[in-house]
Image (cartoon, rainbow, N blue to C red):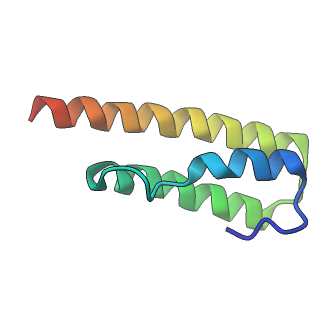
Amino acid sequence: MKLDGRHPSTVAIARWFEYEHLPLHLQDISEDCHDLAVAMIEALPDDPELVAGLRKLLEAKDAFVRAAVAAHRQE
């Protein structure tokens, strides 16, 4: 993700979309949200609404990952 020259708020939230540290069965779920975050960061200028949207996407990603963890435990 290219963050050079971006607002510190954009940079700060973008780091939470990394997914390589997750177990493989969770990486696919998280990667989709990462890819959308990258697309929005590349398409939009720094703005409080960009950060708000990324924050909501981060909340959604966390919920999706928790759902995947729960499903994996039931297997």
Judge from the rendering whether residue 68 lies leftward or rightward of residue 35; answer left or right. Answer: left
Picture coordinates of residue 56, whole percent (x, y): 65, 34
With respect to residue 50, does 60 lie above or below?
above
Please state if 1 lies on the left or on the right of 24 as rendered: right
Residue 75 image point, x, y percent = 8, 36
Residue in the foreground of this view, choosing between 71 and 18: 18
Q: Could you tell me residue 33's position as x and y percent?
A: 52, 51
> Horizontal and vertical percent for residue 39?
66, 64
Left or right, residue 33 beside residue 6: left
Quadrant of the rendering where the N terminus is positioned: bottom right
Residue sitting at 75 percent across and 67 percent down?
42
For the point 26% across and 51% down, the residue is: 25
Of the pair 69 and 39, the residue shown nearer to us: 69
Q: Quadrant of residue 57?
A: top right
Give residue 58's quadrant in the image. Answer: top right
Name the residue rendered at 82%, 60% in the picture.
44
Q: Residue at x 65, y 51 (%)?
A: 15
Question: Residue lying furthest left in this view?
Answer: 75
